[in-house]
Amino acid sequence: MAIDLKIKNAASKAAIFEMRRAGMPMREIAEKIGRSKERVRQILVKGLGTTDHDYLSTLQLCSQSGLPRNRIVELYLDGVISPVAKWDAGNRDYLLWPPETLAKITAYYENHRLCKVCHKPLPKNRIFFCSDECRHERHKYKYMTPEEKKRVLDNIRRYRERRKAVAEGSLMTISR
């Protein structure tokens, strides 16, 4: 009888490992096997040495690809990339992505150029920006390099000095 329990226990541990490798959250694993989330974490750490799985969260995918979250979701909705697992937690969906998703994103952007401001694909008749609004936005002060900002500030300083000199000069001619 004890042997059967050990086999069952080993089988349930293997099932836990498999569910976690598939990207299932520890909370759902705990609900399926009737244990606490903490017990599932302990089993994973003891058996695998970690609670991690091989998949990327959306946040990890954003940081590794350099794209904002809304762009990742757009690629998903456009069918360019597809998640391995999806679950909802109240008002938000969580997605897990296979590691090869990064290669798919890179390949997609090798064939599709992006706007330098909003990072949306460029229309065929555009070179750097998707619209005039993006072009105007890019030329704002906050997007300038430090050298460009220094040049702008020097121009402003010189302008103010000229205006001050003109104002002082005109006051002198009036008082004479």
Image (tube, rainbow, N blue to C red):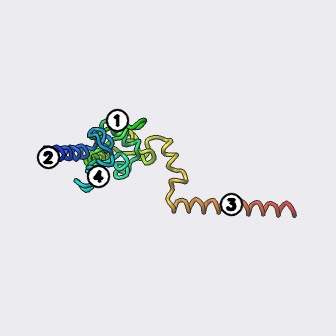
- For the residues labelled 3 and 4, the Cα–Cα distance comes to 68 Å
CB within 8 Å, label 2 to label 1: no
Q: Earlier in the sequence, mark 1 or mark 3?
A: 1
Residue 45 or residue 157, whichever sits in front: 45
**Residue 127 sits above or below residue 168 on the image:** above
**Residue 89 sits above or below residue 55 on the image:** above
Q: Position of residue 34 (x, y in %)?
A: 28, 40
CB within 8 Å, label 4 to label 1: no
Tell me the mark number nearer the camera, choosing from 3 and 2: 2
Residue 130 numbered tag = none
Q: Secondary structure at mark 4?
A: helix
> Circle 2: is it few (<14), some (14-19), or many (20+) Cα within 10 Å?
few
Residue type, label 4 = Gln
> Circle 1: is it few (<14), some (14-19), or many (20+) Cα within 10 Å?
few
Residue type, label 3 = Arg
Residue that badge 2 annotates: 2
Q: Position of residue 84 (x, y in %)?
A: 27, 41
Q: Position of residue 79 (x, y in %)?
A: 30, 36
Tell me the mark number nearer the camera, choosing from 2 and 4: 2
Residue type, label 2 = Ala
Residue that badge 4 annotates: 42
Tell me the mark number nearer the camera, choosing from 1 and 3: 1
Residue 173 or residue 127, whichever sits in front: 127
- For the residues labelled 2 and 1, the Cα–Cα distance comes to 51 Å
Tell me the quadrant of the picture where the C terminus can be found.
Answer: bottom right
Q: Secondary structure at mark 3?
A: helix
Residue 77 numbered tag = 1
Residue that badge 3 annotates: 160
Residue type, label 1 = Leu
